[in-house]
Image (cartoon, rainbow, N blue to C red):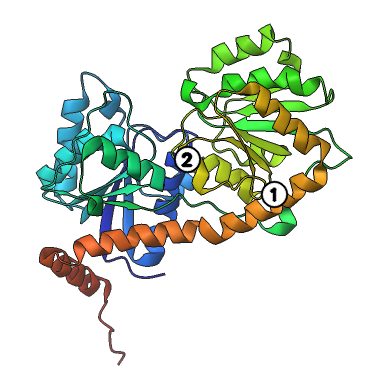
């Protein structure tokens, strides 16, 4: 491990069981190996697994979410950080842009922003060119849409795909093993754009062909009550298991034989990458960044968004052909291991930091001073 000479503030929204939160944690875990000391500041860290939370440098300020106390909280945060300012601020989600821009100006420090998905209709996007140095997009699709919507110069936006940990081959259970009931699952924040209602609409169509299959939906969010109601109305509530209280998706993904990504719009699909890394064959919608991951018939199967009939047909296709499912799963896992390792994401992000700070003379002086402080004088023995 390198001695940290660069301090970075990872400014995150409240942690949830979703891809963007997982990427922040990966950065916090692995940046010290590259000489970067990260500190997370967020309004809510309760969804971080307790043991991991104890290992990381996390400042939790719930007041940042308060309509009435947010202004006071940010002033207190800036005052605390001023005693030992970070060299750079990395804003983890667009929801934290306003605070990140303000902190950068107050502390006179550069900032980087990561964009995980597409701008909403009518959403304003203000990137301060005084302190803002770089935008990281998680896929070519997200980058292209951002440039088209904002008119920003192309050199300002770089692509660094999300990274995932690849499960060792010996830990991967056989797909569609005859000794257990097949489980078709999906996972992610339960939001309307994730398309879970179309997943549920496909369930009775699958059961007409494969009557013993079980279904799993892992995640929490505002759509959960309506999805549970939909399952009851479709008469499949007894076959669909909801798993809402999670620190991560690992156990749920391990329980699945097939993974479905039914999103209507998708920046990249980090949870899909996690499923692939665990040897699960994937069926995904043709949505945005999914194209950079799934090659039809090779590393997964593709269906149109909002099409439950097509989704049911592709699920039945894999359930009826375990050899095809296993071949796709193996190819996808190999692809993820090669193109989306956590180490690559962290190293490329650290390179962005270094390129920004290398021209900053004041940073070079601070780094040299930190190195001197770490060198303890050797006492002579009489």
Structural crowding at the residue carrying mark 2, measured as other residues with C-alpha within 10 Å and reported as few (<14), some (14–19) or many (≥20): many
In the rendered image, is residue 76 in sight?
A: yes
Structural crowding at the residue carrying mark 1, measured as other residues with C-alpha within 10 Å and reported as few (<14), some (14–19) or many (≥20): many
Q: What is the x, y in percent for residue 97?
A: 24, 36
Q: Of the numbered discs in the image, which one, if any, rests on residue 329? A: 1
Left or right: 364 in relation to 185: left
Q: Of the numbered discs in the image, which one, if any, rests on residue 19? A: 2
Q: Of the numbered discs in the image, which one, if any, rests on residue 349? A: none
Q: Quadrant of residue 15?
A: top left
Front one among 376 and 133: 133
Query: Mark 1 and mark 2: span between their CA atoms?
Result: 20 Å
Left or right: 362 in relation to 46: left
Residue at position x 72%, y 53% from top? 171
Q: Quadrant of residue 230?
A: top right
Residue at position x 76%, y 38% from top? 318
Q: Quadrant of the N terminus?
A: bottom left
- Residue extending farthest top: 233
Q: Quadrant of residue 120?
A: top left
């Amino acid at each position: 491990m390198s001695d940290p000479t660069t301090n970075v503030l990872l400014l995150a929204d409240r942690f949830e069981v979703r891809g963007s939160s997982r990427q922040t944690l990966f950065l916090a875990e692995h940046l010290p190996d590259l000489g970067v000391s990260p500190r997370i500041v967020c309004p809510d860290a309760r969804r971080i697994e307790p043991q991991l939370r104890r290992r990381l440098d996390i400042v939790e300020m719930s007041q940042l979410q308060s309509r009435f106390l947010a202004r006071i909280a940010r002033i207190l945060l800036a005052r605390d950080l001023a005693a030992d300012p970070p060299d750079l601020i990395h804003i983890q989600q667009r929801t934290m842009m306003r605070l990140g821009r303000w902190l950068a100006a107050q502390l006179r420090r550069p900032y980087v922003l990561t964009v995980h998905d597409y701008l909403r209709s009518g959403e304003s996007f203000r990137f301060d060119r005084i302190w803002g140095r770089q935008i990281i997009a998680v896929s070519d699709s997200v980058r292209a849409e951002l440039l088209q919507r904002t008119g920003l110069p192309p050199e300002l936006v770089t692509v660094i795909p999300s990274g995932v940990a690849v499960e060792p081959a010996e830990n991967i259970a056989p797909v569609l093993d005859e000794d257990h009931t097949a489980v078709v699952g999906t996972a992610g924040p339960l939001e309307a754009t994730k398309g879970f209602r179309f997943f549920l609409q496909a369930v009775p169509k699958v059961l007409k062909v494969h009557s013993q299959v079980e279904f799993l939906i892992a995640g929490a969010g505002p759509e959960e009550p309506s999805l549970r109601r939909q399952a009851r109305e479709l008469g499949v509530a007894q076959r669909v298991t909801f798993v809402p209280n999670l620190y991560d998706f690992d156990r749920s993904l391990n329980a699945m034989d097939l993974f479905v990504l039914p999103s209507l719009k998708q920046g990249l699909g980090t949870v899909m990458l996690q499923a692939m890394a665990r040897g699960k064959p994937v069926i995904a919608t043709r949505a945005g960044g999914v194209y950079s991951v799934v090659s039809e018939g090779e590393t997964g199967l593709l269906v149109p968004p909002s099409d439950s009939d097509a989704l049911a047909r592709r699920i039945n296709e894999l359930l009826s052909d375990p050899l095809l499912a296993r071949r796709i799963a193996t190819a996808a896992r190999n692809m993820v291991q090669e193109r989306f390792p956590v180490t690559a994401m962290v190293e490329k992000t650290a390179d962005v930091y270094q390129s920004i700070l290398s021209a900053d003379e004041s940073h070079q002086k601070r780094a040299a001073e930190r190195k001197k402080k770490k060198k303890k004088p050797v006492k002579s023995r009489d």
